[in-house]
Amino acid sequence: MICVPITATTTEVALEEIKEAEKVADVLELRVDYLSNPDLAKIVKTRIKPVIITNRKRDEGGKFSGSEAERLNILEEAVALGVEYIDIEWSCGQNVLSRFKDLVRETHTRIICSWHNFHHTPEDLRALYTSIQSSGVDVVKIVTQAKSINDNLKIFDLIFQAQKEGQDIIALCMGAYGEISRVLTPLLGAYLTFGSLQKGKESAPGQIEARVLRHVYRIPELKGWGDFRLFGLVGNPVSKSQGFRIHNRAFQHLKINHLYVNFLVEEVGSFVENFKEYIGGLSITMPHKHEIMKHIDHIDPQAQRIGAVNTVVKKNGHLTGYNTDCIGAISAIEEVTPITGKKVTLLGAGGVSRAIAWGIIERGGKLTILNRTLSKARQLAAELGCRSGGIDELKNLDCQIFINGTSLGMAPNIEETPVSSDFLRPDLVVFDTVYNPAQTRLLKEARAQGCRTISGLEMFVRQAAAQFKLWTGLEAPIEVMRSCLL
């Protein structure tokens, strides 16, 4: 189930938010501690969906400023009003839990007993889980702050344990590293996950919008068994990537029980070791395209020549690395102009640039590689047998195709551009690998000068379509994927 927290500060606004939330929520959580002078009876009577009444105290990350007796009295009122759930903190102690267990004995209200750690994820959570479970509450809730992607695995283990014992559990990690838990834990058997009504309405760090959980990640439509397979983007950062939108839309279009998420990863070797059993394939982005090669079983010959892997496929338990950046970029360019015999200037010598450079050489282009760090340009050029130079050569562009293979112009730095518009000629083809925004300052200025332009979106969609086929064996619905980004 998807639960939407209501974080309004007045009863009137809460009623408005509830009406909106019920379009995407299976359950509501009314954060009474956010409300000033709440009319609980009016709210409970008006809502349609089941509701959790939470009145979080300050030392548990809440906002309630009254006495403890006043706080608990509001929860008693909620039980009397017949709500479906109340949330009681484990720190309240056994006496309070016993009091409410007696109170709900003749009602349909279920008790969620919650424990939060806003600083880290302890190594051993099972003893805590066992203690809460032994108190006889209906739903155990354990929420921690993730300090690395691997912290999610501790939460997954709790869910597996609860499933074996028939215990309803809500378990997840907060923060950027814990974002995947908000998507994956329901598929692993958690009772529900939390999604915000909209950006800015989050009740905890890392909360994803409920409409995204339902319509992009397809919770609760997906089933975490049978033919289910998990894919995702491995990188740092990953928050700006749109891959999760296009791949999940493609899976939905073809009615495939697969899911794609973003994995925020600092140490890729540890990630592969710990998550290998969960994943069916991966997209790899900065800064891991080269490092990932040390941690997989096989590497496709083209990816080996390029020296960068952006796609990993798991088959029969083995991981194989490929590079689809090359085919994505080259096919996007050749849609506009032939490459053979053309003078091409490529700015950048990173993972994406390496893939493009190899493709240009294979197609017979006359390539010059420029980079801020000249040694990197010279090293790549030596591998390819082409020219190289420093960033200063941009002042005298002498080419027919110019490619920006750097992050210059990427959001939020959308006013950046690698070259002045003075150097853009009408006979030039300009390709910007940046796809966020779709129309960078470079592309806008190039079009204004009469240049033919190629958006990074084209490369992005084409390389993603190639990934999709490697993972599934199916032709990607490329127009469906493209429509997600327009």
Image (spheres, rainbow, N blue to C red):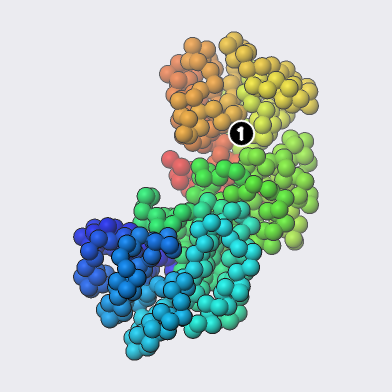
* Up-down relation of residue 133 to residue 474 (above or below): below
Please identify the quarter of the rendering in which residue 348 is found: top right
Residue at point 50% right, 15% down?
A: 420
Residue depicted at x 75% and y 44%: 293
The quarter holding residue 161 reads bottom right
For the image shown, how many numbered marks are present on the structure? 1
- Between 74 and 2, which is closer to the camera in this rendering? 74
- In the image, what residue type sits under mark 1? Ala
Quadrant holding the C terminus: top left
Vertical order, 180 against 142 (above or below): above
Residue 95 in percent (x, y) is at: 43, 82
Residue 379 spot, x, y in % from top left:
76, 25
Q: Is residue 378 visible?
A: yes
**Mark 1 Cα shell of 10 Å, populated few (<14), some (14-19), many (≥20):** many
Left or right: residue 29 compared with residue 482: left
Which residue is depicted at the point 64% across and 47% down?
A: 266
Q: Which of the two residues, 228 or 470, is positioned nearer the viewer here?
A: 228
Mark 1 lies on residue: 329
Locate residue 307, reporting x and y percent: 75, 36
Tell me: residue 125, above or below residue 327: below
User: Which residue is pictured at 35% across the width and 67% down the height?
Assistant: 55
Q: Is residue 259 visible?
A: no
